[in-house]
Structures are given as C-alpha cells and as structure tokens.
Image: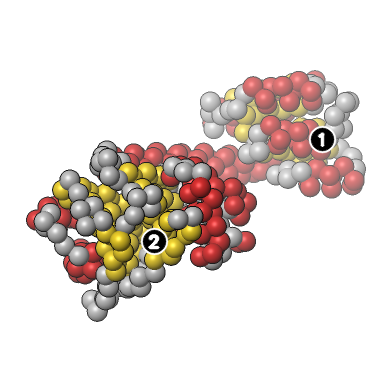
Amino acid sequence: MDKILLVDDEPHIIKALSRELKNWSQTNQIEILTCTSPTEALEIIGRDMDIFLVISDMMMPQINGAQLSEKAKSINPSISIFIMTGYAQLELVINAINTGIQALIIKPWNLEYLIKNLDAAVENHTIRVNEALYKKRIEEELKWGGELQKQLLIRPLPESEKIKFSVNYEPLPSLHCGGDYYDIIALDDDKFFLLCADVAGHGIKAAFITTILKSIIFSRYISNRRSGFLPSDFLSWLNSALLKELVNCPGIIITASVAIFDLKKCEMTFSNGGHTPLFVFREKKMHILSSHGTALNFTEIAEFKDQRIKLEKGDRIYSITDGLIEIGDNYNPLENDEISGILLKSSFEKENSQALCQRFRDKAFMGKFKDDITAIITEI
C-alpha cells in the first residue's frame, strides 16, 4: 500500500493534520504514518520503500526540514517532499527548494491547497510507478531476446587439430541483445567457413535481423554448396536475399566479412562487404588485409572481390566488429595502426578472444563500449 509520512516535532500538529487528511487518505487508499522526530523519520524512510511522500515541518530540533529533504532523497531519490513552515525563513526555504521539494505549505495550512498538491503528488507517483513497470517489462523482453539470440549464436565451434577458433560476443549490457552476428561452419574436414557481420543499430530490431541471417545462410546457401564456393559469391547471394527479405524495412545496413580456410591448400580466401578488415599476425608482425566491398542491403549493384593468401603455421587471423574499435575520445574509431598495436600485444601473449576484448575495454573511452562487440581469433 502506498504511504505518506507526516513529520513534526509538535504532536498536536501531527494529530490535526492526520485528522484533516483522513478522508482523502481513505479515498485514495493511502496509509498515513506519523512521527515527531526527523531522525526517526529517516529510519522509517530507509526501511519502508512504500513511502512516496513526506510532509515535514521546517523548524525541528536536530535536523530542519531542508536537511531532512536532502537526506531523505539520498535514501530514496524518487520520494516527494512537502515542507510546512509558519515563518518567513527565506534562507531555509531557498535551501529546501534547492533540495528539490515539491511543495511549500504555509502554516496554518489551507486544506484545499494542500489536497490539490497531494493529488498532484499522487498523480506523479502513479506515473513513476507505471514507467518503472513499463521499463521492467521492456527489460524482461530484452533479456528474453538476448537469451534467444544466445541460443541462436552460441553453438559448439568446429574442432580440428589443424585450426582453432576462439569467439567472444557481448551485446550492450543495457540491451542484452544486439546486431553482431557470426557463424563458423566446417564445410569438410579441411575446409571452414567464417562469417563476421554487423547489423547497424542496437537492441531487438538489430537482433531480429540476425535471426533472419541465421535462418537463411545455412539452409538456403551453404548446405547445397559444401563442395566449395567463393566468399564474393556468398556475399552477392546474401545481399540479394536480404534485399528481398527486408524489402519492407528500408535503411537497415549490414556489413560482413567472409573467410574460407582451405587447410589442404594452406590458403585463406576472403571478401569484405563494408566491414572492418581482417588482421593477420605472422612472424611477430601484424598485417592488415584490406578488401573493399559494398555493405549489404544497400543496393542491388554491389561488388565484392576475393583475395587469397597462403596460410602458415602460427598465423593468428582476427575478425572483429566495429564496436570493439570505436573506443577513442568521444568513441571515435581507432586508426588501423592503433588497432594493430593492441592485437600485436595480444598475439605475443597468445590471448583468447575474451582477454583480447578486455584489452580493448581497458583502452575504451570511459572504460565502456558503446556498441555490441565481437572478436573471433583463428589460429593455424
């Protein structure tokens, strides 16, 4: 039950005020609590979160009304405060106003004016409660979406003595789900497909697009082409498929990087659709594999080009999304040489993807990422 607390060091004032507010409290189903000590009032506020309003006298021993207001709001920031005073204590009144009181009531009080302010306080309280319930419901739905997305994304990684994958995916903590997407598929014992993609935006909308990617990539394309295909052909197909699937959702842009590892031939073929480039650690140096291409779901006239490199034992290939590198001042993206420096240190330490992401987090503006992050490390 919602409650209000009356605080005055004069018992007869408390009694009179309680009597005049009895009908109002019964009509609004609000319980009236009383006390004659401001220190006791703070104890009551601390243990009873159903109190949404305090009506306090200004002049009391130990703690005045302005001080009580400040301390009460430190305990419960959403609590409302009315201050009652019979004196023109300008300095105290100003102090009380600065603490964020909702009303100043002059003694002897005008009951009609007091109830008008009480009704407004109840209305504001109801709005806050409804907003909190709405936010809680949204939070629960986002958590549900995040769990669903995890089930879609997180699958056992392919295991092989010749190649090893490490993946770390983190949506924004406040949203629980996001637009980063990855897939690693064993085409056969010696050939592996790796996709790292990023849907522009955050939250449920972006996560929904990743479920579309999950539902069409294997069933409509890869399952029928396990014998082999080029990354550029895959990106061309995916671009066309997304333009059809998202015809009623304009403006959704997806970037993607695709690599196919052929361990028999000891080579990697890769193509890029507007995504962060691949980085390769080899012989104590970091190499940037730039492969320019158009982002997906932007235009039917999209061009993708394949590039091929020979693989060597000890290679570490890094596939990342832009959330990991947008960590400079005011979240500006890092330059490629800065990214290479962080990846180089991680490579020397032979860190996994979780430790790598922590390195970037330690460098991040205000120590936080502003976007979903994904890091995939492929070790040969």
Closer to the camera in the image, 111 or 275: 275
Q: Mark 1 — residue?
A: 67
Q: In the image, what residue type sits under mark 1? A: Gln
Closer to the camera in the image, 4 or 352: 352
User: At x 79% / y 47%, what residue is drawn?
Assistant: 98
Badge 2: how crowded within 10 Å, few (<14), some, or many (20+)? many
- Mark 1–mark 2 contact, CB under 8 Å? no
Note whether 283 is above or below 141 in the view shown: below
Q: Disc 1 to disc 2, how far (Cα)?
A: 59 Å
Q: Determine the residue located farthest toward the bottom in the rendered image.
A: 301
Q: Earlier in the sequence, mark 1 or mark 2?
A: 1
Quarter of the image where one finds residue 21? top right
User: At x 83% / y 23%, what residue is drawn?
Assistant: 10
Q: In the image, residue 59 lies at what x, y percent?
A: 87, 32
Residue 215 visible within the image: no
Residue 113 left/right relative to 379: right
Q: In the image, what residue type sits under mark 2? A: Leu
Quarter of the image where one finds residue 46? top right
Q: SS class of the residue under badge 1?
A: helix
Note whether 273 is above or below 102 in the view shown: below
Task: Kindly identify which numbered label has been placed on residue 96.
Answer: none
Q: In the image, residue 346 lies at what x, y percent?
A: 51, 48
User: At x 34% / y 39%, what residue is drawn?
Assistant: 147
Task: Kindly identify which numbered label has been placed on residue 278.
Answer: 2
Residue 367 visible within the image: yes
Label total for image: 2
Closer to the camera in the image, 233 or 12: 233
Residue 120 left/right relative to 199: right
User: At x 59% / y 47%, what residue is drawn?
Assistant: 362
Q: In the image, residue 83 lies at what x, y percent?
A: 77, 38
Q: In the image, residue 123 lies at what x, y percent?
A: 56, 43
Residue 269 left/right relative to 50: left
